[in-house]
Amino acid sequence: MTALDRAWWKEAVVYQIYPRSFNDSDGDGLGDIPGIVEKVDYLDSLGVDCVWLNPVYESPGVDNGYDISDYRAIMDEFGTMADWKELRDALHERGIRLIMDLVVNHTSDEHAWFVNSRSSKDAEYREYYWWREGRTPEGTGLDPDDYDTPADVDEVPPNNWDSFFGGPAWTYDDQTGEWYLHLFDERMPDVNWETADLREELFEMMEWWLDNGIDGFRMDVINLISKPDGLPDGEDPTAIVKGVDKFTNGPRVHDYLSELHDRVLEGTDSMTVGEMAELSIEEAKRYVGEDGDGMSMVFTFDHMRLDMTDAGRWSYRESSPRELKETMTHWQDGLADEGWNSLFLNNHDEPRQVSRFGDVGEGYRRESAKLLATVLHTLRGTPYIYQGEELGMTNYPFDSLDEIRDVDTIKNVRAAQKSGQLDEDDVMDLVRYRTRDNARTPMQWDDSEHAGFTDGTPWMPVNPNKDTINAEDARNDPDSVWHYYRDLIDLRTERDVVVYGEYDLRLPEHESLWVYTRTLETDDGEDTLLVVLNFGNDETEFEPPADLVGESAEILISNYDTDVNAVEQTTLRPWEARVYDLA
Ligand code: TEU
């Protein structure tokens, strides 16, 4: 079946591990690599094909490992290189691949390159980062009081860009009297991809990891690596962060990524998934399309923005199931002929999917978690399971800002309060709903004191619902969310149509039903699945599309007991999900 353009990463289900919160083997309260090794059989029994490991490299931990100080070393708290090799081998022995996080838009300020770079204007590594002189404030529209400079320095930075973590993207450095760029924390300076030596070092580092047997990379904020000539001010007043219109999908990003592909990835069977906020279909094709940069797939974020206003992450608006269906359909259709989608509804940066898109208030947690799983595993693309999602883990009931560890939440809340965008009353509601820490509470293995995550004191509190939501109980209960995931994963292995079938939205106008078919032409005819999802706590009448009424069918998988032999009008129960096999 060459016509299908098969690839292992299209057929795979990826499981994302946030090592800090997965399993602690030594009682220090932080998860670690030996802890993951202990759980490799767990992953195998779930049936996943690939693990994406969030950063485990040496790091001061300002942003939980996204601030890397040595790309070729493992952070002490997580273990050693020998531990990492044991994990790699344990996964590979079970046929599970391993992809690593590639964070090359920035490093830690403790990386040897930056330490050297900031030491003098003519330091060897000066050009590995973005150093610029400041400007006099007049005419810039910027207020020197918004920047942290010594009293005798009356300057503003070279442009108005803001950091994703709140506040300016530039920091003044005393040592040389210049400013450096950081699109995230000030302790995470952006590297300068225009410097050929820097690119060379990064490519060699990637080759080194591939030589060490990894199967690919998840590329952190990869569409931010090319900055425009002259570093112009951001002009888009609705931009989610000031400057995004200038530094996203920059002028040389495709040159860099094509070079990276030719130099490092060509001829390997590795997968790459680029994390790309702010992306249109047309732009996505330049990365993953036929004439693109050779990337396997992209993480896009339109569906993660539906519950925000133009004011960005630290705002809230109510979104509807129909908007979710339309947004995801836009990407299904957009990349139908070229490129490939990644399917996710949560990750380590987002709240828990069942709390955000499902129901945790009125007793349908289990049903809605299964419905969301059905979406992720029956759309066209590669499904990603974020640790704990397979248990239907929920957001944490944070009471106060003191419980928050996440630098992004802390800084953005501070900035929003300063600018008056958020008042005290709204803050905790929004934090509880949105904070990345929702995803970072410990994995719930059992109902013991710290949910089986650690014998020590966990670095983040364990969700009190571990008494009822935990892996041990889920594995013992054939009706659990966990078993449902396993069945969905099996289905993918058994049926090509799940992976390769064409997506076709039906009943597009329906407000709460999401209905689609997946169809694959095979040598034996046409293989068709019909997916019907009732998004909500209410019962809903399903009037099938006229051309499908009466078609003989059986249920391949559903979150309720259902017995049918044809597609017929029916009343769907709250959060009911059905996959019909149209034989
Ligand atoms: O995230 C990039 C990113 O822009 C967001 O998803 C981010 O969490 C949010 O917008 C912050 O306002 C990636 C990583 O996934 C994230 O964990 C890192 O903090 C970030 O890059 C920096 O490396």
Image (cartoon, rainbow, N blue to C red):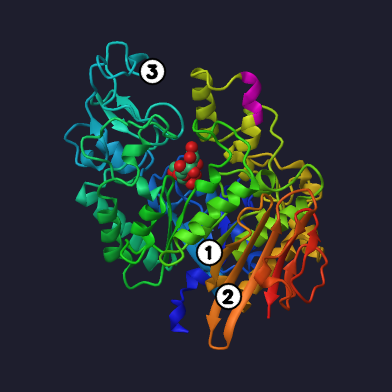
404 relative to 463 in the view: left or right: left
Q: Secondary structure at mark 3?
A: helix
Indicate which label's residue lies in the foreground, 3 or 2. 2
Indicate which label's residue lies in the foreground, 3 or 1. 1
Say above or below: 226 vs 282: above
Which residue occupies 62% across, 43% down? 351
Nearest to the observer: residue 359 or residue 542: 542
- Residue corresponding to mark 2: 497
Spatial separation of the CA atoms under disc 3 and disc 2: 55 Å
Residue 188 placed where, x, y %? 39, 37
**Mark toward the start of the polypeptide (3 vs 2):** 3
Q: Quadrant of residue 583?
A: bottom right
Amino acid type for the residue under numbered disc 3? Asp
Magenta residues span 424-429
The kind of secondary structure the magenta stretch mainly shows is: helix
**Mark toward the start of the polypeptide (3 vs 1):** 3
Indicate which label's residue lies in the foreground, 2 or 1. 2
